[in-house]
Amino acid sequence: MKFPLSLVASLALLEHATSAVVEQKRGTEASAYCSNSGGNYKLSSVAAPVQGSGNPGSESTWKLSVDDTATGHKQTIVGFGAAVTDATVTSFNTLSSSSLQELLNELMTSNGANFALMRHTIGASDLSGDPAYTYDDNGGTVDEAFTGFNLGDRGTAMASLLATMKSLQPKLKILGSPWSAPGWMKINGVLSGNTANNNLNDGYLTSAGLGSVGYASAFARYFVKYIQAYKQLGAQIDAITIQNEPLNSQSGYPTMYVYDYEAGQLIRDYIGPEISKAGLSTEIWAYDHNTDVPSYPQTVINEAGQYVSSVAWHCYASNVDWGVLSEFHTTNPNVKQYMTECWTPASAAWNQAADFTMGPLQNWASGVAAWTLGTNAQDGPHLTSGGCDACQGLVTVENGSYRFNMAYYMMAQFSKFMPSGAIVLNGSGSYTYSSGGGIQSVASINPDGTRTVVITNTFGNDIYLSVSMKSGDEWSGNIPSESVTTWVLPAAE
């Protein structure tokens, strides 16, 4: 159906020269790349926008105006990527060395997606083969001296893969997240299988309070041991969250419930000081769960702000509202935010990954990570007892070869053209109708001075888009139907 209206809106972009942007060699011509619902465009070069108003002919039009002054500058991009799970490592390691090198080059360098943010699982997640594990299970016996600490084959393989990724992408930021503490540190004494007392045994639920009994100190030292072990294998851990989805307690796979004040006190009194005492620079990010309980990360920051640099959000709230991130930024302007998990099932709409990348970027997120980077053809390996059995990776590995799925191309439309260090620009004018058709956009100024505009067109017809910039130039061109199209524009003159 043709979209019948011309919409005039505003989208803030960039200032031509600012001290915040490193001036390098600049491109002088515009270019455009597209991935679409039909799959015939996959990061494909398409007709570049032209300077001026162009010629829309009979096409429906959409106009964006741009404020390209310094007041339009928002957050700095850290990177995009996905979760490196045991499923990812296992499936990737079935490839020949040459095929794996080729795949990693496409994922981690500017020849492909240029990913620069990877979240990895500390021990088992639901996307691990049986059995579930941590780095110090010790047969369920208390091990405060960590004599049984061992990455094991799976932890060692994960560290090795992350180290290789880091060698290909020097700007890679690695975030580690545990699905549970070792069973012996928990009140119920088990890693999984029981939701009763599925809490850290740290004294928080006693009248004497956190630290009065139990293993708060051991939990903190567990993180230090893990960070040091990965570093020895060449995988520098840049950040951690202390618990994946702390408000999620299930029996079928490793989980652990952590209260908001408990998390803040653990970080303030134990984990933060222990990391600092060890001389490590690893950051601590709060929360790692859905947008519907923003009071949780606020409580953690209020309790432990001296140790918490960022907040991690997931996409699974029943009515996900990325505007929560903008509200959070208003209250906490110096805290970075990330979207650290959203699944990419084969059944998802073509633009699902574009939506969970676009929305956070429009609302102050500095990075986005999908769940998960790679799986086999059965969306695994995964635990047989619970969790996700339909979590398709951005990459599927099968019979010694690999293929990129739709979500990969949707995310690469951002990551390939908005590198680490790009500055997101204030924007308005994006709109989606109740029918589902619309235009969503986000823009950046890049370290080399070029400008990027990413546009999602969910209409069933092409749109002729014009972007008018306050500094004087205007760019116009075709945006194919049901596509994500990226314009790379030369630096403003």
Image: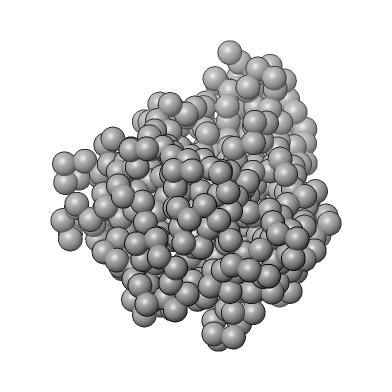
- Depth check: 358 or 488 in front? 358
Q: How many marks?
A: 0
Residue at the spot 40% in from the left edge and 65% down from the top edge: 141
Image quarter where the C terminus lies is bottom right
Residue 480 percent coordinates (x, y): 51, 29
Residue at the spot 43% in from the left edge and 72% down from the top edge: 143
Q: Outermost residue toward the right?
A: 331
Residue 188 visible in the current orientation: yes
Residue 476 visible in the current orientation: no
- Depth check: 182 or 349 in front? 182
When the figure is inspected, residue 233 is found, relative to residue 296, above or below; the finding is below
Image quarter where the N terminus lies is top right
Residue 472 percent coordinates (x, y): 75, 52
Residue at the spot 36% in from the left edge and 31% down from the top edge: 40
- Quarter of the image for residue 26 reads bottom right
When the figure is inspected, residue 123 is found, relative to residue 228, above or below; the finding is above
Residue 125 percent coordinates (x, y): 42, 50
Q: As drawn, is 379 to the left or to the right of 28?
A: left
